[in-house]
Image (tube, rainbow, N blue to C red):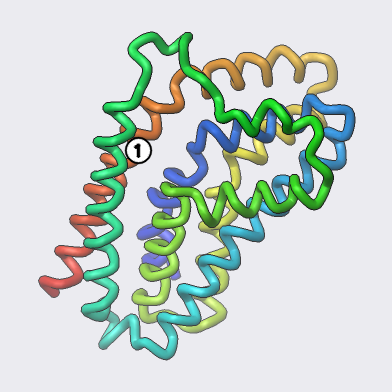
Amino acid sequence: MGHAVGDVLGLAAGVAISPLPIVAVILILATPQGRLNGPLFSVGWILGLTLLGAIMLAVGGPGHASTHKHPATWVGVLKLVLGVLLVLFAARQWRRRPTDPTEAQLPKWMAAIDRFTPPKVLGLGLLLSAANVKNGPLTIAAGASISAAGISVPQQIGALAIFVFIASLGVLAPLAVYLFMGERARSILAAWRNWAAQHNAAVMAALFFVLGLKLLGDGISALAT
């Protein structure tokens, strides 16, 4: 199990560093229903990662993701494809980054976030985790890595739980600050929000590139075994 966890720690950190979801949860916490909707967003986030990872574990079971404790060919091919996609996303994100970070604009839907109902907030958390162009591929890759580790089902579930926890730290941190730091939370979260909004494009481009190269390397290694 330790080997499987080691394989996915970098992927989990890549999911955790998600500027726009962090901005989203901070904006949600600033609304009148923040004490309810903030935890709901986090639940949706965790649920999305868990479901996507569990699907990959289920696929990897009957699909023989591991042969004699070596990744199956399809696992290597999957990681290669995901790696190429992330590198392409990195190039696109870098080209689209604003030359002046202070001119960075948030998605238009964030302006209406104070009017989101609890079900919409839950769905938003799920969407930004499982359907995100960075987080989705990374979670799929993590599920494939765990499946290919040649460990028992309980150990796979444990490894996935560790991945989901680490991958959720980015959105859980603002919630913890909001719940436990009282009046200081406002200024801390405002500073986090401004930094994440201004540097989202550059951070995402760097993460796409680095993690894309990692997946390409993992895929080549798996196919060469």
Give residue 59's position: percent from left, percent from top: 44, 81
Q: Residue at x 41, y 81 (%)?
A: 60
Question: Quadrant of the rendered structure where residue 6 is?
Answer: bottom left
Depicted 61 relative to depicted 36: above or below: below
Depicted 180 relative to depicted 50: above or below: above
Residue type of the residue flagged with mark 1: Leu
In the displayed structure image, the side of residue 45 where residue 152 appears, left or right: left
Q: Residue at x 52, y 17 (%)?
A: 195
| Number of callouts | 1
Q: Secondary structure at mark 1?
A: helix
Give residue 140's position: percent from left, percent from top: 42, 63
Q: Nearer the viewer, residue 45 or 96?
A: 96
Depicted 102 relative to depicted 147: above or below: above
Give residue 58's position: percent from left, percent from top: 49, 81
| Pointer 1 residue | 207
Q: Nearer the viewer, residue 65 or 2?
A: 65
Quadrant location, the N terminus: bottom left
Which residue, as the protein is rendered here, is positioned at the far bottom? 62
